[in-house]
Image (cartoon, rainbow, N blue to C red):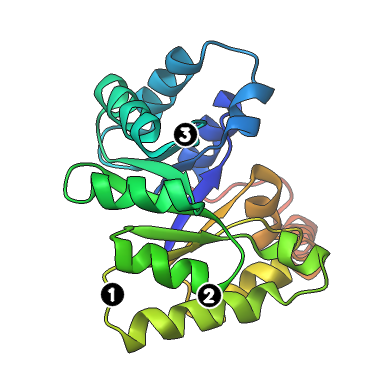
Amino acid sequence: MLLLMDTANIKEIKQSIEMYPIDGVTTNPSIIAKEKRDFIELLKEIRDIIGYDKMLHVQVISQKADEIVEEAKYINKEIGGNFYIKIPVIPEGIKAIKMLKGEIKTTATAVFTPQQALIAAKSGADFVAPYVNRLDNISANGIKVVSDIVKLINIYNFNTKVIAASFKNVEQIYGVCMAGAHAITVNYDMINQMIFHPMTDWSVLQFVKDWENFYGNKKIRT
């Protein structure tokens, strides 16, 4: 299972890379704009932090296939490394995924149905990114959609992987992992919540208390 950070915040990325087994970073135009910095300079800094082996997913803003391809080639040239261009599953986006197949790796994004994922996979997308919480917000079942996409990919033996996105809580993350998602991308708060449990914190404090009751402040040294 691949674990990616869904952020363009430099501080969050540095802390996450240091603390957790992060496989890469995903971004979108909203995440990028939130940082209020030059687009390419920010992406280059992210690349420098994570290195050239970890994945960096960057989304296009164009909506015509030729322009999407041009944008993808430009960003790939500027950023390099293990790069994926994120393309929404609109008709022109599907066309662009087909055009880029074998040249630049693609992530089909803004996926809300198994059918969208199926078409993207057949067109050559390396990843498909279903939005879990956004589905739940419209009274759909985000985890089931992820599960169905995984089943379709397995049935037809596509090389495409599922990168589940858009989470509000760790229960959703657990659900997509159990459904067989190949990857998840989460924000900084969610990755910290993934390992949080009040009983864990209580246990650690109790261990320290019991130690100090007998040994005082004596530390363990090799």
Q: Closer to the N terminus: mark 1 or mark 3?
A: 3
Residue at 64% across / 76% down in the picture? Answer: 143
Q: CA distance from mark 2 to mark 1?
A: 14 Å
> Which amino acid type corresponds to the residue marked 1 in the rendered image?
Phe
Identify residue for label 1: 158
Tell me the residue at 31%/62% (across/down): 123
Q: Are marks 1 and 3 in contact (CB under 8 Å)?
A: no
**Element carrying mark 1:** loop
Q: CA distance from mark 2 to mark 3?
A: 22 Å
Q: Residue at x 35, y 66 (%)?
A: 121
Residue 31, x across and y down, in percent: 63, 32
User: Residue 1, can we see it?
Assistant: no
Find residue 76 and name its label: none
Q: What secondary structure is found at the residue carrying circle 3? A: loop
> Which amino acid lies under the numbered mark 2 shown in the image of this protein?
Pro
Left or right, 14 with respect to 81, comes to right
Asked whether the beta carbons under mark 2 and mark 1 sit within 8 Å of each other, the answer is no
What residue is shown with label 3? 60
Q: Is 60 placed above or below 205 here?
A: above
Q: Quadrant of the N terminus?
A: bottom left
Location of residue 86 in the rendering, given as x and y in whole percent from the top left corner: 44, 44
Name the residue type under label 3.
Val
Considering every residue shown, the one lying at the far bottom of the view is: 155
| Disc 1 from disc 3: Cα separation | 24 Å
Q: Position of residue 117 (x, y in %)?
A: 46, 68
- Give the labeled residue for mark 2: 114
Residue 39 seen: yes
